[in-house]
Image: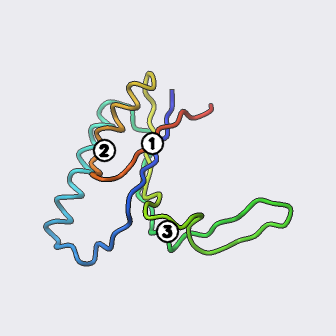
């Protein structure tokens, strides 16, 4: 069964992060993704550009397009993983292992 793990966290500017700290943080993500791939659970996954680059289309009778994120919040959608695992418990296990302290992971089944 496929599950979408959507990742929410406060956006940060990586410009003030040392190359060593950035490399260490990326290694955790690379290791996590490698584990997903090795388990054959990985379908897709990517980080997203900052919410300031987003464009929102409101689907109403008169469609409205606006720059920026849908809602003004501290936490933004920062990335996702699409995984294929046996059940919700397995999806939750993968979600708990995401190296994102302080963030939130929403787990949803995908309608096939």
Where disc 1 sits, the SS reads strand
Q: Are marks 1 and 3 in contact (CB under 8 Å)?
A: no
Q: Are marks 2 and 3 in contact (CB under 8 Å)?
A: no
Where disc 3 sits, the SS reads helix
Q: Position of residue 53 (x, y in %)?
A: 52, 73
The image quadrant of residue 83 is: top left
User: In the figure, 7 relative to 56: above or below?
Assistant: above
Q: Position of residue 1 (x, y in %)?
A: 51, 26
Instruction: Give whichever of discs 2 and 1 has the lower sequence position.
Output: 1
Residue 5: mark in rendering = 1
Residue drawn where x is 38% and y is 32% of the image? 92
Between the C-alphas of marks 2 and 1, the distance is 10 Å
Residue drawn where x is 84% and y is 67% of the image? 62
Instruction: Give whichever of discs 2 and 3 has the lower sequence position.
Output: 3
Q: Quadrant of the C terminus?
A: top right
Pointer 2 residue: 98
Nearer the observer, 45 or 103:
103
Between the C-alphas of marks 2 and 3, the distance is 21 Å
Between the C-alphas of marks 1 and 3, the distance is 18 Å
Residue 51: mark in rendering = 3
The image quadrant of residue 26 is: bottom left
Residue 49: mark in rendering = none
Residue drawn where x is 27% and y is 51% of the image? 101
Q: Position of residue 52 (x, y in %)?
A: 50, 74
Where disc 2 sits, the SS reads loop
The image quadrant of residue 27 is: bottom left
Question: Badge 2, how many Cα within 10 Å: few under 14, some, many 20+?
Answer: some
Q: Are marks 2 and 1 in contact (CB under 8 Å)?
A: yes
Is residue 105 rendered to the left or right of residue 19? right
Instruction: Give whichever of discs 1 and 3 has the lower sequence position.
Output: 1
The furthest residue to the bottom: 16
User: In the figure, 36 relative to 19: above or below?
Assistant: above
């Amino acid at each position: 069964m496929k599950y979408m793990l959507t990742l929410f966290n406060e956006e940060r500017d990586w410009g003030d992060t040392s190359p060593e700290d950035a490399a260490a943080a990326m290694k955790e993500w690379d290791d996590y993704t490698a584990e997903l791939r090795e388990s054959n659970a990985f379908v897709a996954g990517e980080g997203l550009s900052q919410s300031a680059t987003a464009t929102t289309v409101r689907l109403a009778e008169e469609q409205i397009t606006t720059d920026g994120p849908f809602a003004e919040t501290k936490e933004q959608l920062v990335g996702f993983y699409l995984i294929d695992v046996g059940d919700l418990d397995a999806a939750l296990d993968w979600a708990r292992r995401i190296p994102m302290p302080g963030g939130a992971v929403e787990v949803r089944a995908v309608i096939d």
